[in-house]
Amino acid sequence: MDNNYVIEMLNITKEFPGIIANDDITLQLKKGEIHALLGENGAGKSTLMSVLFGLYQAEKGIIKKDGQVVEIKNPNDANALGIGMVHQHFKLVEIFSVLDNIILGKEPCKAGFINRKEAREKVVKLSEKYGLNIDPDALIENVSVGMQQRVEILKMLYRDNEILIFDEPTAVLTPQEINELMDIMRGFAKEGKSILFITHKLNEIMAVSDRCTVLRKGKCIGTVETKKTNVRALSRMMVGREVQLQVKKGEAHPGERVLSIENLTVPSKIHKNNAVKKVNLNVHKGEIVCVAGIEGNGQTEFVLALTGLEKPSEGRILFKDIDITKASIRERSKIGMSHIPEDRHKYGLILDYTLQENLILQRYWQPQFQNHGFIKNNEVTKYAEKLIKQYDIRSGQGPTTMARSMSGGNQQKAIVAREIDKDPDLLVAVQPTRGLDVGAIEYIHKQLVAERDNGKAVLLVSLELEEVMSVSDRMYVMYEGEIVGEFNSKDITVEELGLYMAGAKRQGETANEK
Amino acid sequence: MTNILLILQFTILYGTVLSLVAFGGMFSEHSGIINIALEGIMVIGAIAGAVVLALCQRAVDAATMSAGTVQFLTFMQANPGFIVVLSILAAALAGGVYSLLLAFASINLKADQTIGGTALNLLAVALAIVIAKSINMTYLTNSANPQVRYVNSAFKIQILENPRFEISWFFIIALIALIAAYIGLYKTRFGLRLMSCGEHPQAADSVGINVYKFRYIGVLISGILGGIGGLAYVVPSVSTWNFEQGVTGFGFLALGVMIFGQWKPLRIFGAAMFFGLFRAIANMSDTLFPTLVMNGFTTNIFNMLPFIASMIILALTSKSSRAPKAEGIPYDKGLR
Amino acid sequence: MKNNFWKVLGGWFKKTAQNIGRWFKSLFVSMDDKEPKLRTLMNSPKTLSFVSSIICIIGGLLVGYLIIILIDAKNATSIFGSILKGGFANPYGAGYGLGNQLAYTAPLIMVGLSVLFAYKTGMFNIGVAGQYTLGAFGALYCAIVLNAPWYVCILAAMLLGAVWGAIPGLFKALFQVNEVITCIMFNWIGLYMVNDLMSSKITFTRVINDNLTISSMFNRGGANTWSLATVNKSSLLPDWGLGELFSGSSMSPSKVSIAIIIAIVIAVVIQILLNKTTFGYELRACGKNKNASKYAGINDKSNIILSMTIAGALAGIGAALLFLTDIQQFPKSTTSLSSLAFNGIPVAFMASLNPIGSIFAAFFVAHISEGAGLLTGTTFSKEMANVFTGIIIYFCAFAPLVIEQLSKRKNRLEMQMLEEADNAKPKEEDGKEVNL
């Protein structure tokens, strides 16, 4: 057994109800190396690291530290072994100072009174040693995201962690801050600390890591030495070569323009940059346009602004040549926009309403369903039964089932049924097939193509490469809030697409290949 | 001059009550539990303290009482200071125990904190009346009276003789509480960890802090201070208190004080005194503003003023009001 | 011809029998791809909430009983028994007692509706007491000062209550101030304002008859408002013979009136409003999921204001339904908020927030209040009922959640099985295969 591995995760299997998140994965971390963990959404990277940090327990497999088998039941155990983690969503108290956040839980004390002087000295020393620039007295709510991340890193160093896990660390950083972070990581590695970092950004992997393990759909595809590979190879490992789904569709016959988005800019709720930066996009009748990209690159905010749930700070939205940038949600619905939302429990359904009450959520005020303010229950039930039959929505008691007790897949079918049956001119669908079985996925895709063939416009936002490639006619790739490429689906390969999605390539530039 | 002294005296009296209770609410909310039950906790503390007070001041009757009781009562009545201490302890203990009901429901059972708090308010007033009546019946007046009578002179400290000016021991307690709250929250490890539980319990949990334990402590402190505050409202001002009126909304007023004080000890103290001033003016409105009173500014209108002022300030400052971020949301360790 | 008739009749019987048989079968067995009806009933949220209410009530009664034992063990059982007997144990006869109990049930239904209506739309209306006080003022002013008939008095009460309910709604919608604290503040503002108006600001002179001219809302003793029977009989709620029906051994009618009928009718109206209209659909949606309501284009700000206004109106009507029966008079310069109004909270939660349920919950609260009020010993009296209701709502704060958790655990396993079944087999439709 090669024993310069500081951490070994051997044959880890972690299951959740209905899904195997980690399937017999082996990951070995050498002392002093920077090891990247690469994969698409749902590949299992975060789950694997959560197992290492003690947030979850694996069903099968063992973890070894320095050759010894260890049990990590909670973050305290992980900490005791010297393992620290910087989460994607920071765990910082906004109104505390930087210093207080770093020492929380491990405050130097004299008879219960915090010795802030001693704490400050230690923290300042650490920050100078590793070049982590912070202001100990600033409040977290006033500090940049880059500094917040440095605070999280200092939390780990203050506790003498030697094994540092970073979960998508560059997701919220500016390019400047990303370079600084990479220098910091190199410094750690030189000192003998070992780093694991989760990412989907190929450039960064090439720039800073020593080795890289690739996961796909819960399985480990392999571990490679960064020096001996390039972005294309990594992309291929990440997405695989074959496209499993084939959607039967004919040629698209795009007609007049239905949606035109100009310079749309939407601020972010979690960091000071904009989530969507001056995006231009259009959709015509009779075509399926997809916005492709990895989760967290601005698609959510883009859709919220388009459908009226959020306000953009700049830009215009023209729908059938009418400016709807400031229109209310009901108005957008009335003039022909439908929205299948990303978060079905937050926006798409009222879980404590029945299935039929949910199916009329967008139409309860129409004459078909109400008479002088009184809901026509019979009509609603009839309508619900029609949709249930048409879309094969399964539930315990038919139209009067509580939405909460339906399975996720059937909840999604209900939403899809409702939105498509509205007969919209523009159907905005975000991750419409998430959580559905193969049969349902194919049915939904068929519906989308049918809408398109009926002369409707479809805007699909998807994180699944296969779906993007096989369903859409045209696509835009969104990376860090900007459109980095626009293609006809026939003109691009999966590997190329992966490069654009991971930020390794932009239209108009050559790829950052090594 | 006497008027100014009287206003000052009343201001301090009411301000003391409001600070004590608001400090209690502050600790609870800093740990993450919204405590609407302050009104009820005050009532329970008041009845406990008042009953102990009245019982200790009973006429000693060697014929009907046991030797031990006679000895105890004679000793107590000869040393009124002890009676003061005992009744305050009783109020604190009662308030603390009562608050545990809220703590258990909110922390372990993840109950809705507003409903739980309201339930405890309703229960407390009714319970206090029943206790008052039964104690009166059995030990004191031999009639089921909801009013408790006592001598409150031992609670007062005379500062000036002529003109008369006095403060109560509760004011001293409030000052001590202020200092303790300030140091406790900002200078100790306890305070830092407590506040983290109300701001970001997941962060606290991830560094090994026991969120449940700190929330229990926060609510317990609010129970103790609220209980003392209840006694502070009832005892110093009058020598009889009718428990059918509860604490006339002072517990809720303390919530308003806590919000204006933005959950910070010094500001809460200031806000409490400010409101105390309003109440003092209301009490003395006929001597202070006889012309106004004649023209229709009755006591009732003066009584409304603190509440109206609260609403105006709340409306203006709500956008910048910064409550502990995670308060009111039950913490579930399972959902990381 | 005759043969045909019997044939048709026979066929009809057979069909009905078959349908009844089918219905019965569907209770226990899965039919038409739907699960057995009994199982749905057991799992349905309505059943769960009904069961949890009953558990809360029983639990509350038991703990209250324990408290009585702690204070007066000797008489505990008879005291508890008295409370449980309610108005039926009235010394003037069960009919009389029941009549007065119904007189209190009506306002309790209204305040219960007030709290539950607001809660269904996402707000905790602890301001029910202030709205009630304003309503009382409206009704009494019209009755005593304006000599108005009862329906005008109810209208005034409703309007003033509505205004007082709108205020917290406005504060929340426009300034984002939490409605709980606004309601609490305005409870006290309302109380002092009404006190002030009634005791010092309202001056009038009205001749009642040769012997009586009044110039104040308060009676000669000065402690309470005038009895309406004395100053304005037209303001008393008519009783349509109910008073005679529920009368006592002394043959004097109890204070029951059409109030109880009005309250029940309004409860039914609220039930229809919440569950059968588009307005109710929008309100409930806002209460259950603000985000999804926004997504559906529902305007949550105006709904907040509207629902609090309605809640206030309901509380105001409640006050009218009490004071216009003359069963109580309004005390002068009171320093405590109406305890009856606050009992709207227990009524609402005991009824599991169901308008029809609130009729029964209100009756229960009135029942134990009457029972406590009739206690002949002196230590325990009417506030004992509040001890019980306080404990019951304490249980209501968490019992539904606990029961829901327990049933969720059972449901999760069932749902898992449902999902696996879903994914396993395709569904055959009219012989055609669904694409797979």
Image: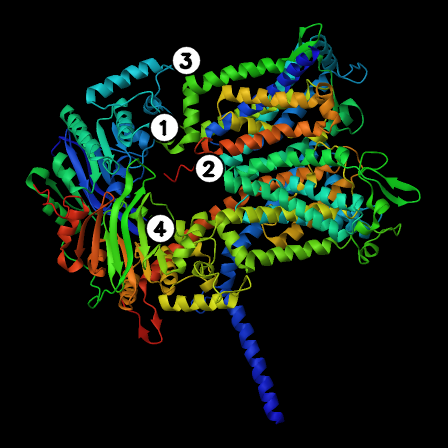
- Tell me the tag on residue C323: none
The residue where tag 1 is placed is B208
Between marks 3 and 2, how big is the CA–CA gap?
Answer: 31 Å
Q: Are marks 2 and 4 on the same chain?
A: no
Q: Position of residue B53 (x, y in %)?
A: 70, 18
Please give the name of the residue rendered at 45% of the width and 28% of the height, measured from the top-left corner.
B213
The residue where tag 2 is placed is B330
Q: What's the amino acid at mark 4?
A: Thr
Q: Is residue B52 left or right of residue A217?
A: right
Between marks 1 and 2, how big is the CA–CA gap?
Answer: 18 Å
The residue where tag 3 is placed is A111
Q: What's the amino acid at mark 3?
A: Ala
Please give the name of the residue rendered at 12% of the width and 36% of the height, measured from the top-left corner.
A207
Question: First in sequence: mark 3 or mark 4?
Answer: 3
Disc 3, disc 2: CB below 8 Å?
no
Viewer can see residue A192: yes
